[in-house]
Image (cartoon, grey):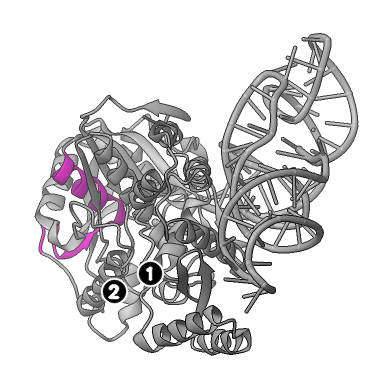
Amino acid sequence: MRLYSTLQRQKVELPPPPGPVRMYFCGPTVYARAHIGNARPFVVGMWLRNWLRARGYDATFVHNITDINDKIYKAAGVGSSAELAARATEWYLEDIRDFGLGLPDHLPKATETIPQIVAFISELIASGLAYDVDGDVYFRVSSYPAYGQLSRQRVDEVEGQDEEDVPSPRKEDSRDFALWKANKPGEDTWWESPWGRGRPGWHIECSVMAEDLLGPVFEIHGGGLDLVFPHHENELAQSRSLGHEFAHIWTHNGMLRFTGEKMSKSEGNVVTVRDALDRWGRETLLLFFLTAHWSKPIDFSDETMQQARAQLETFQNALMNEGDGEGNWSDLEAALEDDFNTPDALAVLHGWRTAGATDELRRGLELFGIRPSRFDAPDAIRELAEERRTARREGNFADADRLREEIEAAGWEVRDVADGYQLVPR
RNA sequence: GGCGCCGUGGCCGAGUGGCUAGGCAGCGGCCUGCAAAGCCGCGUACAGCGGUUCGAUUCCGCUCGGCGCCUCCA
């Protein structure tokens, strides 16, 4: 099993089963409903974990929730930031549950990791890798010569990472980034720390949550491509400067595009997971994600979603009857072992479909959480279909056609098959 | 300006130095009372220009175009 890693710029082999394979994928900041792009790391992470387990790996998946930061304060306005974060966390949990892929092994929250974060920052300070100024603590970028190794940024060309537009005069170096931020007026959520009241910076929480649950060395760190710099670069710097290997493989999923651009809250071109689920259903959405390689961008549009839906229907049709074809499971393994190539895997599934290898097909789709539903038509529809069947037997095709139209008007399609009929929702 | 990704047939989308990807849509056919589903067949694609090579969609260079990051962002 190998995966393309941003750090090494090539596919990196995973140790053989049972591993372990410990995975940490960055989750969302909770201050609004998650959009579909936010869901990609979750979906890819769950697929990967489930697949690794199926392959005999001891896989652990940690997916964090950032429930404290500037955006949350801002979005909460005069309301309670903690309340907003709690509500948005529930939204997110509902959303990911509804994908039907199961849940990560751990869903840590930044606000529940504060003591570990404080301890980690203290260690950085004690090692001379960080310094505090009036209640703020910054990581000293110059103390870590390998800084920039992940994003291939040259340290001297990196612009300042100031949270506000004005460079902070308190920093030794504009590239230094905050580990701890002193509480400011209007910020209603804070913790006591050796540096005074405040709250953790964005990057440190991920280093700490990952190491807290997975240890100082783990196999895979994932997240959106937009997090490579500065977020992941900073995580890597914090942890490695303390001598921890931290993650070995860094996977970055491609951006979800909508109206030609990256879907993002700040652009406003957003479709929430909730809306997409309601409109298209979870299986179509999953199939949609399957159509593109995880590392590539993917376009969300009516057309691409309709194509996904059409594919899903062909699978559903195939699984309405048991086939007696044979499928080669290793074909699917080959596709997934090589960088988790789901479009390639999809082609294998279609091969099984046309071959009538329904056992393998069902098992293969199940891996991705796609479980074609049974179609149980309501009694009223069944009665119409029975009536139509009788009419057809008697050669009364005018009535048969009229009944079909009635059934269609009620949202169902009748298909005449060898031993009767099938009812499929339209 | 710096770092990086990508451009495959109407659409989506893998992949490879020479051998059919696959799907969706379309067209033709089989099947069907008519349909639907399914099956068979068809389009003969790799942005452009150079270069390397016996041979390039696949390697190198340039051009054009799209995208991401460098600021919060999955």
Q: Chain of mark 1?
A: A
Q: Is residue A166 visible?
A: no
Q: Residue at x 54, y 58 (%)?
A: A311
Give the secondary structure at mark 2. Answer: helix
Q: Are marks 2 and 1 in contact (CB under 8 Å)?
A: yes
The verdict on residue A138 being magenta is no
Residue A91: mark: 2
Q: Chain of mark 2?
A: A
Q: Amino acid at mark 2?
A: Trp
Q: Amino acid at mark 1?
A: Ala
Highlighted range, magenta: A192-214
Horizontal relation, residue A187 to residue A75: left or right: left
The verdict on residue A212 being magenta is yes
Please state which of residues A162 and A405 is positioned toward the viewer in this rendering. A405
Residue occupied by mark 1 = A34
When asked about the image quadrant of residue A278, the answer is bottom left
Question: Residue A171 location in percent, x, y?
Answer: 34, 51
